[in-house]
Image: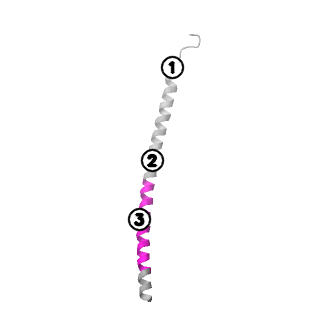
Amino acid sequence: MDTDRLIELEIKIAYQEDLLQSLNETVSDQQEQIDRLNATCRVLSERIKSLFNQNNADESVDQTPPHY
């Protein structure tokens, strides 16, 4: 009886180790994806800022005087 219980515990431990490894891989993949998304957000934010600054610079040059 003790042998059966020991085997059952070893099987459970093996499944838990497999699950833990799978979860670690999932978390690692998700962190890589988060890092890529953060980098993309930074690039897009910089592009938006540069376009905004460019539009503001263009508007100040091309504005007609208020008396026209």
Name the residue: 44% across, 72% down. Answer: 16
- For marks 2 and 1, the one nearer the N-term is 2
Looking at the image, how many numbered discs can be counted on the residues? 3
- For marks 1 and 3, the one nearer the N-term is 3
Q: Residues within 10 Å of mark 2 (few under 14, many from 20)?
A: few
- Helix, strand or loop at disc 2? helix
Name the residue: 58% across, 13% down. Answer: 66
| Residue 18 highlighted magenta (yes or no) | yes
Badge 3 is on which residue?
A: 22
The amino acid type, in three-letter code, at marker 3 is Ser
The amino acid type, in three-letter code, at marker 2 is Leu
| Residue 16 highlighted magenta (yes or no) | yes
Q: CA distance from mark 3 to mark 2?
A: 23 Å
Q: Where 59 sits versus 68, above or below?
A: below
- Helix, strand or loop at disc 1? helix
- Residue range (magenta): 9-32
Q: Residues within 10 Å of mark 3 (few under 14, many from 20)?
A: few
Badge 2 is on which residue?
A: 37
- For marks 3 and 2, the one nearer the N-term is 3
Badge 1 is on which residue?
A: 61
